[in-house]
Amino acid sequence: MLTIKDLAVKFPSRFGDFSAISDVDMTIAPGEIHGLVGESGAGKSTVGAAVIGLLSAPGYIANGTLTLGDTDLRTLTEDQAHAIRGDRISMIFQDPQTSLNPLMTIEDQLIETIQAHSDVSYSAAHKRAVDLLEEIGIKDAAKRIKAYPHQFSGGMRQRVVIALAICTDPELIIADEPTTALDVAVQSQVLDLIRRLAKDRKIAFMLITHDIGVIAQIADRVTVMRQGRVVETGETAQVLGAPTQPYTRALMDAVPPLDRRIDRFRVPAEEGHLAASAGISNAAEKWLLEGQQQAPMGLSLKDICVRFAGPRTSIFRKPDPYIALQDVSLEVKPGSIMGLVGESGSGKSTLAKAITGLIKPSSGTMTLGDLDLPGGKSRSRHHPSRQLIQMVFQDPYSSLNSRHRVGAILAEPLWFYGTVQDAQERTKLAAAMLDLVGMAPDAIDKYPHQFSGGQRQRIAVARALLARPRFLICDEPTSALDVSIQAEILNLLKDLQAKFGLTILFISHNLAVVRQMADDTAVLRNGQIEEINASEKLFSSPEAAYTQKLLALTPVMPTDWTALRA
Amino acid sequence: MIAFVKRYEGLWLFVHSPAAIVAALVALMIFLGAVLAPWLALVNPYDLASFSLFDGLLPPVWQDGANPKFLLGTDDQGRDMISSILYGARLSLVIGLAALTIAAVLGVGLGLAAGYYGGRFDAIVMRIADVQLALPAILTALLIDGIARGILPAAVQQDLRVAVLTLAIALSLWVNFARTARASTFVQMNKEYVQAAIMMGQHPLRVMFVHILPNILGPLLVIMTVDLASAILLEATLSFLGIGLPADSPSLGTLIRIGMQFLLSGEWWILWIPTLFLVALVVSINILGDFLRDVFNPRLR
């Protein structure tokens, strides 16, 4: 039904036209869920935008044909294109927070959309809106329809966005990362809904995502893109189960499996500088090992509670505190990796902040080795834990000071902790450390913005190591990265941990990643520990009902693709 | 070439913005003229021997009765208008820049600290800022002037007029800096690089000035240019009203005040030339400020 042929999109710039996508061919049949995967910058979203005619200026379609049914989408006038948008093609965006108007009730938004596309009375539109909400699984729709978007949870909001998209009976819906901002439980509900709509209403979906697990779960056919070109396309089971292209194979290798633990990820050798080491990493390695006189240190948390002041509602009464963590007790064994998983808002990052002394627990004790860790501001600036505990943050774009050169960023811990007195020595060591984490040593003269996300994360790891830590907290270190880069970073962390006997607290919402990394795993929910166990045991035979649910809902790669094809 | 242009994005935008180029040229010429006044000016308005009453009230060269020696005419004392303006701009710019520096140091320091510490300290600093905003600059100037007159011996009062005026202007400008610095600091405080620095146990002053300050310089630079224009205008206003500098030290404001007396007697140039000069200076600085804001805020491009 949707046919794309030889599509090319270009963005004019001061330096000549930049070709965003070229030679893209794709067909989507009615009722088909067509997955479009690729890493960031592959041009997935550009394809979607070109189809719906919403390419961000000054981008333009340079070549190719786009046909929906028997309508040529490229020859439409502005008005005709506008009429088709919403009527025959709809769109679902990534963030349900921003794709709904916060000042209009759900009712008004639905009725407005319905009336914009068909000439029906208000009461008829209202009835249709209620029916739609019921169809997509919102209970008590007649009452809930009066609510404002902020009164719905994230998953409910995404359902409303889907209701908006289908209220005009479109033939094609372009879903751009529709579940990326959602937790696994909500994600699986939304995916079920999409599958049902495709089946019952024969709506074709173009499902744009970077998550191959999602594709494996619901897409009928899949197109793999890379650098603006189609790498491979076909039945999902065939493309993902028996990839013919090396890139697809590498992509599949990089996806961490949930059902087993693999020691190292296979990483395409052409990427990164790992292959061409400058050979000065020995200096950094020796320096790090010098600092290893101390035995590996474990971390023990006892009954940690963290409360935040709630919103004040009265001048005279203290507001009820918001409980972020309740009686959290953890034992991270020396030299091991403890995984910490949980959905957003479960208190994972709060725990990391409590350990690093950024916030003060209201009760409980923390000890690192035999060192007592005072909480929050009562931990002095010269407390030894300031050096022993280091952290790798989630967002490599904000964790490095963009106004400092990489060399200065890396030399800072050496200077600050007084481990290396000589400035030239510091620079030398920083370069050696860059080599150790797989970066070209000449990076020290550059600024962070000159590097990609994965490279910045390597720099962040190097900075943490230059403090000679014994305990490393990794807070979602790969969730902002593409899978192949994620695989590289995870390999790096594993290597470093093994070499230098680090103890690591590995925080992630991604169960599969934690399974690959952690010796033990703790599951956090609403500020409380649901289950702690050795990873092998926790993942193979989870005890807590919540853990079982999380594991069941996480999209997995089928081990046997032939079964799926049947 | 491409790499070069990408690297100097701001320069590229500058070259392609005629308004910014003209404004920069005008501002540059005025700055140079002010700095080089002692060498450029025909007469020195501070030196009674360098001008003569006989040259008084000569019109600009394109009018009848002009002396080609004085291109833009002379005032009633026989002082060359160009010389007076150059010396006046010199004084105005010195006061403006000094006031700006004091305001920036005070405002950025307080704003950074308020954003960094938050809580009670932030509340106190910002309430003081609110009070400051409620007082018109002229009132602040009068207040400081009054206090200075009260506590300083009469002998040094005349010498300290410039200092008093500068302080008054600085006090009415620091709030802009404090508010912007505080808001930007709040944004940066949530960034992980700041948390990393705090976690390491770095001194708060180091976190503020080494880590946060370079990241919030953009908006501060914009305020600096716009506020330089405000400072110059404020000085002119205060001097015009007679609160600022005495008539014998010709800042742009004093020149305009003197010119007022001749507005109705036919000697229009004594008022209009310094006024137009002031407008040109302020407008060009403001255009530069707007341009800088566009450079630092890619969303407006």
Image: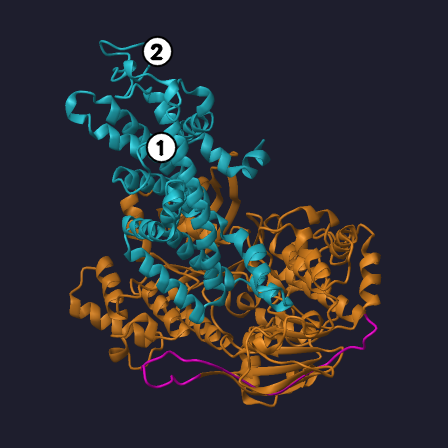
| Residue kind at label 1, given as amino acid type | Ser
Q: Quadrant of the N terminus of chain A?
A: bottom left
| Residue A203 visible from this viewpoint | no
Residue count near mark 1 (Cα–Cα under 10 Å), binned few <14, some 14–19, many ≥20: some
Q: Which residues are magenta?
A: A292-321
Image position of A475 with respect to B265: above or below: below
Q: Earlier in the sequence, mark 2 or mark 1?
A: 2
Side (left or right) of B48 relative to B57 = right
Figure colour of chain A: orange
Report the side of A506 relative to A37 (left or right): right
Q: Residue A481, percent across and down? A: 59, 60
Q: Nearer the viewer, residue A92 or B52?
A: B52
Subunit of label 1: B
Mark 2 surroundings within 10 Å by alpha-carbon count, few (fewer than 14), some (14 through 19), many (20 or more): few
Q: As shown in the figure, which amino acid type bears the numbered disc 2?
A: Lys
In percent of width and height, residue B262 lies at: 19, 25
Tell me the residue that label 2 is attached to. B69
> Residue at horizontal 69%, vertical 66%?
A490
Chain identifier of the cyan chain:
B
Q: Residue at x 66, y 52 (%)?
A: A406
x and y, in percent, of residue A502 in the image: 75, 72
What's the mark number on residue B249?
1
Q: Can residue A309 be found in the magenta stretch?
A: yes
User: Dominant secondary structure of the magenta stretch?
Assistant: loop
> Element type at marker 1?
loop
